[in-house]
Amino acid sequence: MFKKLCEKSFPKSLWVYHCNVGACNGCDIEVIDVLTPYYDAERFGIKLVASPRHADVLLVCGPVTRQVVPALKRLYEAVPDPKLVIAIGSCAVGGGIWFDSYNIVGGADTILPVDYYIPGCPPRPEAILHGVAVALGLAEKEIESVHLKQLLDRPESVPVEVESLYS
Amino acid sequence: MNAQQLGENIKQRFAAKVIDFETLGSDQLYVTITPDSLVEVAEHLYQDQGCRYVINGGTDRRQQRDAFLITHFFAQDEEKIYIAVHTEVGADDPQVDSITPVIPAANWSERETRDMVGVVPVGHPDPRRLVLSDDWPEDLYPLRYDVAHDVHPPPAEGVAPERLEPPEGASVVPIGPFFPVLEEPAYFRVFVEGEQVVGADYRGFYSHRGIEKLGCSVLTYNQVPFIAERICGICGYVHSCSYCQAAERAAGIEVPDRAEYIRTIMLELERLESHTLWLGIAGHIIGFDTVLMQTWRMREPLMWLCEQITGNRKTYGMNLVGGVRRDIKPEIYGDLRGVIDKIGDEWAELAEAIPGDSTLMARLQGTGILTPEVARARGAAGPTARGSGLAIDVRVDHPYAAYDRVEVNKCVYDSCDNRARARVRLGGTIDSINIIHQALDDMPDGPIMAEIDEELPAGRQAMSAVEAPRGEVFHWVLTGAENRPERWRVRAPTYANLQCVPPMLVGNALADVPISIGSYDPCFSCTERMEVVDVNSGQVRVYTEEQFRAEYDQPGAK
């Protein structure tokens, strides 16, 4: 149903807002790479916008740090409905190698409802393009999804279910 | 003068205040002094010996010595010496004199030590929280050995960073935490009167991930390079390289020649990749997207080349303590030379076109002035320092890997503006290509990894620095038990360069703020790897327009 809504809501061009919530920059530069001549996401109508209020899609890179949480919540609210959230890179998918560090809250889905996950450290530009194309209904998932569980031994932690496009 | 002689000079001058000193080779000096003499020793090094301030680090040694170890690091670039000044403060009264009043560059790192280890710098002019998040409890210090790496205090609502008040009559323009031209989260508050910037406040450390803590409590020696590489996704190799060199030096491991050459080549490839990236972003910031598209088109074959060599486009995963994991095979030399030559040709065209483009020059020339005095006082590094006429380059001043066997030019400009910093990078790129060619010409055969049979000995220390695309990366490793460092201190170049931002913005038009920040090629993830919170410099010098124009002939003129 969600897919149908997407097809209806975003049939032509997708405006994306990119936010880094504590990433090392690796994913961010690959996101920019997707927009430059070799990969040229703009041919699919995908455009990077400067304000979350203009965006259809929020691209989240990096593990969510404590300091960034309030700003990230406000940012999410600023994106008008209907909206998609795509977590890019291992850190945004599940917290990455710092998942249990004292200043890390976890993956993007600990704060926001995430619709699509694109894993990788950093994901290749092709993977990012493919992930966005799957979200748009332009491409099919290539591999069946599996459910992974990441359990932290913190009292307040809850199991995080990760649906991956590739695993 | 070598390290031994410098140590003797200091010992002679301060007599009983110097408890002990030791050297590592002729280029590293470790001085232990009494806490009450810290300010005078620091001032002597900084003023009389002409040393450059690097960073401060705190180590919790309550298990071994019932004390906290406070270390200030200096570099004497002319004599090619790194100096660590250690002082111990008792665990029952964790206070130490602040040296920020005499060396402004120590501002952030003293606050970081307070946040992370809990040693209070007495007399600090701006004692606000720097690194930890706003809702972090006051009395919990993550780098203390008895605090777990995965401690998660409950979040608090309604907290906000402490802010500087704008000057009378000025308005505040907030930039961030999410802002289109900043790839990373950071929060600047720019104080303006009309279009003119009169001051700035900065709250960063949104990307603090606790990396130093992980390196000292969870990982082992050979796992650290991989997390070090993820300090920064753009210039990660410099961190893993610098860490490995420090660990090797501490343990006395000889790295094979071929591994040193491979490191040199990979470091220069990374510099090429980073400088092309920077130029594109700079073009994007000033609204000239053609530059972005062209430079990133040029850069892409380099990414493919790196993938061919290392298996990944970025975060190469090549370094281990003792050498490198992958060889650069002779079959690939041709491809490598082809790719960099092509970039060199296209870059030369670009480097010629850019100074001739009046739109670009109007935005770069005379904006973002950073005087040599401010640059030195705040510890600027790399292209930022070289754009202000300070001729410092770790590759020449403190050679590492194979840089003592290749020819490196220091690319220095003294117009102190955004244009100077751009020209340093334009020239540095061509230089990188020459270095790679030289290294390929001389590349020796042999093993790429040293044989290491025994565990690394505990209680040894070493410093190592690498010239990253953005400036000097500095690592200090104190070896420990359980096959991991007891303390691993990292300083990224942006840590120093960002402290120059508030004074640099003053006097600019608001529209020039993004490119001025961008001209540092800021990399917040490097800077903030280890701790969390808000930052700013205490004293911002405020110019009137007349003073400013008098001092820097006609900014904004073409």
Image (cartoon, helix red, strand yellow):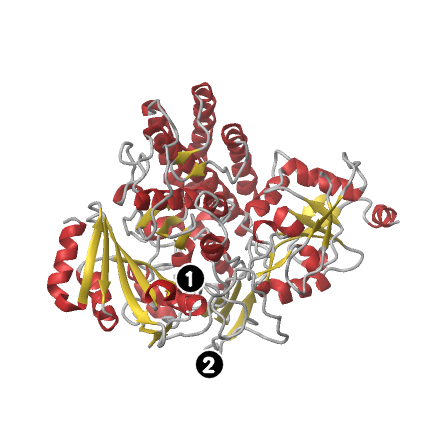
In the image, residue B221 lies at what x, y percent?
43, 45
Badge number at residue A102: none
In the image, residue B338 lies at what x, y percent?
46, 23
- Dot 2 lies on which element? loop
Q: Amino acid at mark 2?
A: Glu
**Please, which residue is most extreme toward the left here?**
B12
The residue at which mark 2 appears reads as: B168
Q: Amino acid at mark 1?
A: Val
Image position of B184 (left or right of B500): right
Residue drawn 13% across and 57% down? B8
In the image, residue B493 lies at what x, y percent?
40, 53
Label 1 crowd bin: few (<14), some (14–19), many (20+), radius 10 Å? many
Chain ID, mark 1: B
Image position of B149 (left or right of B488): right
Q: Is residue A116 above or below residue B437?
A: below
Q: Earlier in the sequence, mark 2 or mark 1?
A: 2
